[in-house]
Image (spheres, grey):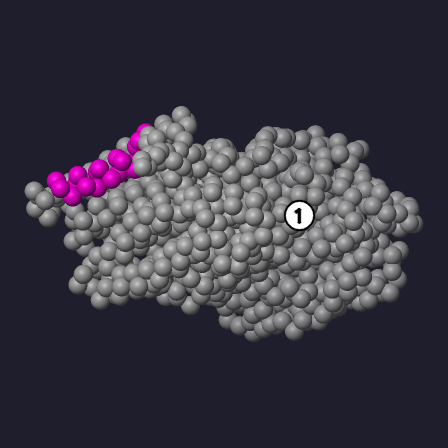
């Protein structure tokens, strides 16, 4: 008996192949080098690989590359959009941390290789066409990030972060996998299209299948740190080295949202009522946690952890209605969130020195010493708070508009009220920067790479706030698979 | 043309950021830019056609076409008069900060110019989202103005100001989105033609009310104002009282009344109630104040109560009186804050008990103080009288009881203003530093001259100002009548 082999076309896989080859090649090449030069080589190699993959994705997004491996892997405009965000989410942490990594003695081969592997995992998630591919990407990404979180082996907090993330993350993966098995049992399908057809045709859905949907949703909620599955994130954010935190705040969330897009409106299209309620619950709880729990924080990384829980809450609002406007809104929101976050972490890295820069109070009076950096920080904080005319407002506007147009006025109201509460802790940063007298000298130089990241992020926050047309057009085109 | 007036100050701010590096030249650039803006706005006034209620100087550029959002600008008589108030007060404010602001002058001037841009934009925007963006954007420079250059409790005041206003505004955002969803556009003139069922109107009205009431501010959400006023630098208080408070009343006038006429009618007793509490209660609170700025701040709440009373009288006299009262209050409270600033620069105190006998050392100052106090009290011959009188007439036509209670507010207003004037200006000199005071400088005098002229001009011959409003207010009343509201009142009192 011969097993029919699906036709395998490797072209849609090119970006992934580039990243995978680069990661493995650098691992080998590093073996012949000493620690120092191997790290530098891997760093430049990783940058080059990411740029190359970005170019391929950019070109490939125009010529439709389609599916391969019998529908297990999908390269569509949506995947291209998410991958472009992920490239930025991987490249920026490398660039901004170039000097810091050197100082922390983290500019080593393994660091960059792990980032590449995590990126590869995220890319596979965005392109997944069935639950197995999705799980494969999810685990590759997660395992790499567990190691990154605990990368500073001699640091107790980092060890705690790595272990905590690993234990809880494995639990979430287990939930996810159990959910997948239930869905397989209920529908007999493992690809998203098969599941969708089986559920749509069946009319009624078995209780076990619905339990599976809940478990899958919970597993993904953990990855994007949506409350109440966010407990790990403040500790892990705080304990990890700041460059890792920056990386962690972006890539897994974007990949997680990409997976949610594939699974909820894709595979579970006919169960919109069920997962709509789940998302509504997740978003309201996330908004509340993000707004309230960030207020008492004194550590800026912990504060940002809670703040990103809040941002995930906003993004989830956009998915609740299951409308195209909503799907677009979330993509806009993610793109803007990414750059606001990257800019903020780049500033924290530039200003941080030997334990200074972790506490919010360390930034007292920055505006008196470094007016430009302080102005950018204030800009990013106002943008995160959603004050127009900055990009953060455009993101929130789209989200609330999607909710209101679908009749979810109450949910939108919760969202805006949460944003008013959250404005308090963003403003507190501005207050500390501007209204207080400086104690520290703030004489840190801004390296070329980190300056680039800061400048690009600040510029995008300004430009997208006033003229978001290009971003919107791109999103409009990328969302076509869900129309 | 309108965009030029709106964004010239912002361009000025950018010019200071990139090209001007010395404090002295930043002052000159800021003053020059704001004066140029004022002259341009006078040009708008000259070209304005007072015979039509249509929006004029229209501009429309596609912005986010997928969402029905465009860059739409235009003014009618109501917004033009507030625009003129803004462009007049800003150069005065900049001149008032000439010497009193010593630290980070460039940043200060930039914040001020940006603020002017956003506020003008709020009055000119004919796209609801543009309006909202500018309405919120204005918070950033004001937050910095209070927080960086303010008094000892500036951080508390700045945060309170920002969060109070933001909490109100975000609810308005939802109302805007709902309204735009109903009307399939963000264009304000288009949305004015929309007829919504009463239950939708009621909810939308409440959404807008939260935001506008905080801004006006109406009792009981006025508590941010005394704090913000007291801690803000002099020019900040002037702009806050003179212009920012008008944005709330403008919101009622531009959106609530024409777009939600039935709901406005439905809620009118509620608004009357809150306005009366504001007029009477805050006047009583003002009587108790020992801090000059706080007293004027509370008097602002009281005066703005008159404005909301007039607007919700739904007749021509009430609405025109309300708008005129907005302008009067902008001029007079602005002048009073400037007067406080003059003595504060010299003595660094605002405590009423620390003054006394200023008339003996500062005769010119005392005279000015008297004129503006009288205008605030509403003495016939000053602008305050015209505004209050029109409002009371309009309200009287709607409800005699409300008008009677409101009139007691005028008496109380006279009580606290005259009491304050007596304590500060008359009496004997009891403090050595007061004895050493010198009269106001020519620069300071220059601040008051335009305000003084307007006080008497509007007081004796308000017609040129009211003429600006007639057509627009008529248009508004027609629109409300089409919504089934206020028709009988509109004809009750003939012009």
Question: Does the magenta run of residues contain A11?
Answer: yes
Horizontal side of B98 relative to B392 (left or right) equals left
Toward the viewer: B229 or A14? Answer: A14
Residue drawn at x 17%, y 41% as measured from the top left: A26
As helix, strand or loop, the secondary structure at mark 1 comes to helix
Toward the viewer: A377 or B390? Answer: A377
Q: What stretch is highlighted in magenta?
A: A10-29
Toward the viewer: B94 or B300? Answer: B300
Horizontal side of B439 relative to A26 (left or right) equals right
User: Which quarter shows the N terminus of chain A?
Assistant: top left
In the rendering, at what x and y percent does residue A100 appear? 22, 51
Badge 1: few (under 14), some or many (20 or more) residues near its Cα, within 10 Å? many
Horizontal side of B72 relative to A138 (left or right) equals right
**Which residue sits furthest top?**
A63
Residue drawn at x 63%, y 30% as measured from the top left: B59
How many numbered markers are drawn? 1
In the rendering, at what x and y percent does residue A53 appear? 30, 34
Question: Is residue A167 at least partly visible in the picture?
Answer: yes
Horizontal side of B161 relative to A221 (left or right) equals right
In the rendering, at what x and y percent does residue B435 appear? 53, 67
Q: Mark 1 = which residue?
A: B178
**What chain does mark 1 sit on?**
B
Task: Give the image quarter of residue A225.
Answer: bottom left
In the rendering, at what x and y percent does residue B312 appear? 79, 54
Question: Is residue B370 at least partly visible in the picture?
Answer: no
Q: Main secondary structure of the magenta part?
A: helix
Task: Give the image quarter of residue B118.
Answer: top right
Residue drawn at x 41%, y 54% as measured from the top left: A181
User: Which quarter shows the C terminus of chain A?
Assistant: top right
């Amino acid at each position: 008996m011969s097993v029919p082999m699906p036709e395998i076309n490797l072209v849609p896989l090119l970006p992934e192949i580039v990243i995978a080859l680069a990661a493995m090649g650098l691992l080998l090449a590093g073996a012949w080098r000493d620690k120092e030069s191997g790290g530098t080589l891997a760093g430049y190699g990783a940058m080059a690989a990411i740029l190359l993959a970005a170019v391929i994705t950019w070109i490939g997004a125009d010529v439709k590359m389609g599916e391969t491996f019998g529908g297990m892997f999908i390269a569509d405009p949506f995947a291209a959009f998410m991958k472009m965000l992920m490239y930025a989410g991987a490249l920026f942490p490398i660039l901004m941390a170039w000097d810091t990594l050197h100082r922390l003695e983290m500019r080593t081969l393994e660091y960059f290789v792990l980032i590449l592997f995590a990126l590869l995992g995220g890319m596979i998630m965005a392109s997944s066409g069935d639950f197995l591919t999705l799980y494969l990407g999810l685990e590759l990404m997660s395992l790499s990030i567990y190691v990154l979180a605990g990368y500073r082996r001699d640091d107790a907090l980092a060890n705690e972060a790595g272990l905590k993330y690993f234990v809880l993350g494995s639990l979430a993966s287990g939930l996810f996998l159990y959910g997948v098995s239930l869905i397989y049992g209920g529908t007999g399908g493992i690809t998203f299209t098969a599941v969708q057809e089986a559920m749509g045709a069946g009319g009624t859905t078995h209780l076990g299948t619905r339990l599976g949907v809940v478990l899958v949703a919970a597993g993904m909620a953990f990855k994007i740190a949506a409350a109440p599955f966010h407990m790990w994130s403040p500790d892990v954010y705080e304990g990890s080295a700041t460059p890792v935190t920056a990386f962690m705040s972006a890539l897994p969330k974007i990949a997680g949202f990409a997976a949610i897009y594939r699974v909820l409106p894709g595979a579970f299209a006919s169960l919109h009522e069920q997962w709509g309620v789940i998302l509504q619950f997740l978003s309201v709880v996330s908004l509340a946690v993000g707004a309230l729990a960030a207020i008492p924080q004194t550590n800026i990384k912990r504060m940002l952890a809670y703040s990103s829980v809040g941002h995930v809450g906003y993004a989830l609002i956009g998915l609740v209605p299951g409308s195209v406007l909503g799907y677009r809104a979330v993509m806009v929101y993610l793109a803007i969130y990414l750059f606001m976050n990257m800019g903020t972490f780049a500033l924290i890295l530039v200003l941080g020195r030997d334990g200074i820069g972790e506490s919010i109070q360390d930034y007292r009076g920055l505006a008196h010493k470094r007016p430009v950096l302080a102005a950018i920080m204030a800009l990013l904080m106002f943008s995160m708070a959603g004050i127009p005319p900055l990009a953060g407002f455009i993101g929130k506007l789209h989200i609330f508009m999607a909710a209101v147009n679908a009749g979810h006025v109450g949910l939108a109201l919760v969202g805006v009220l949460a944003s008013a509460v959250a404005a308090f802790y963003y403003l507190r940063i501005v207050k500390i920067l501007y209204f207080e007298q400086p104690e520290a000298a703030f004489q840190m130089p801004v390296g070329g790479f980190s300056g680039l990241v800061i400048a690009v992020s600040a510029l995008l926050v300004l430009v997208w706030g006033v003229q978001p047309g290009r971003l919107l057009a791109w999103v409009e085109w990328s969302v076509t698979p869900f129309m | 043309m309108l965009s030029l007036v709106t964004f010239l100050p912002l361009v000025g701010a950018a010019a200071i950021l990139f090209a001007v590096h010395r404090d002295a030249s930043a002052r000159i650039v800021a003053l020059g830019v704001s004066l140029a803006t004022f002259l341009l706005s006078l040009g708008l006034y000259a070209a304005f056609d007072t015979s039509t209620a249509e929006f004029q100087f229209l501009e429309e550029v596609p912005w986010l076409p997928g969402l029905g959002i465009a860059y739409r600008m235009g003014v009618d008589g109501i917004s033009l008069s507030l625009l003129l108030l803004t462009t007049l007060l800003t150069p005065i404010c900049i001149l008032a900060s000439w010497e009193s602001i010593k630290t980070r002058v460039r940043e200060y001037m930039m914040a001020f110019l940006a603020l002017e841009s956003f506020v003008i934009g709020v009055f000119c925007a004919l796209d609801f989202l543009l309006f909202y963006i500018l309405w919120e954007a204005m918070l950033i420079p004001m937050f910095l103005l209070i927080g960086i250059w303010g008094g000892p409790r500036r951080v508390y005041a700045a945060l309170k100001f920002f969060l109070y206003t933001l909490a109100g505004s975000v609810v308005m955002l939802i109302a805007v989105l709902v309204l735009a969803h109903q009307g399939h556009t963000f264009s304000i003139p288009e949305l004015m033609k929309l007829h919504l069922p009463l239950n939708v109107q009621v909810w939308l009205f409440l959404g807008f009310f939260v935001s506008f009431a905080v801004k006006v501010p109406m009792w009981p959400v006025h508590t941010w104002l005394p704090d913000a006023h007291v801690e803000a630098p002099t020019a900040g208080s002037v702009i806050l009282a003179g212009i920012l408070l008008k944005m709330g009343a403008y919101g009622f006038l531009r959106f609530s009344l024409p777009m939600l006429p039935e709901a406005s009618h439905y809620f009118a007793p509620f608004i009357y109630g809150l306005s009366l509490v504001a007029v009477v209660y805050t006047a009583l609170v003002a009587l108790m104040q020992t801090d000059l700025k706080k007293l004027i701040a509370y008097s602002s709440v009281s005066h703005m109560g008159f404005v909301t009373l007039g607007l919700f009288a739904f007749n021509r006299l009430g609405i025109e009186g309300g708008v005129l009262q907005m302008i009067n209050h902008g001029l007079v409270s602005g002048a009073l804050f400037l007067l406080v600033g003059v003595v504060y620069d010299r003595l660094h105190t605002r405590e009423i008990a620390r003054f006394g006998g200023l008339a003996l050392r500062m005769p010119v100052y005392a005279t000015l103080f008297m004129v503006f106090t009288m205008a605030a009290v509403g003495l016939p011959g000053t602008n305050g009288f015209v505004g209050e009188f029109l409002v009371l007439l309009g309200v009287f036509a709607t409800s005699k009881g409300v008008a009677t209670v409101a009139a007691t507010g005028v008496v109380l207003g006279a009580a606290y203003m005259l009491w304050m004037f007596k304590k500060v200006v008359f009496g004997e000199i009891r403090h050595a530093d007061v004895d050493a005071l010198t009269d106001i400088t020519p620069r300071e005098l220059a601040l008051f001259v335009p305000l003084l002229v307007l006080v008497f001009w509007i007081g004796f011959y308000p017609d040129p100002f009211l003429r600006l409003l007639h057509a627009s207010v008529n248009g508004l009343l027609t629109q409300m009548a089409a919504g089934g509201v206020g028709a009988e009142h509109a004809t009750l009192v003939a012009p």
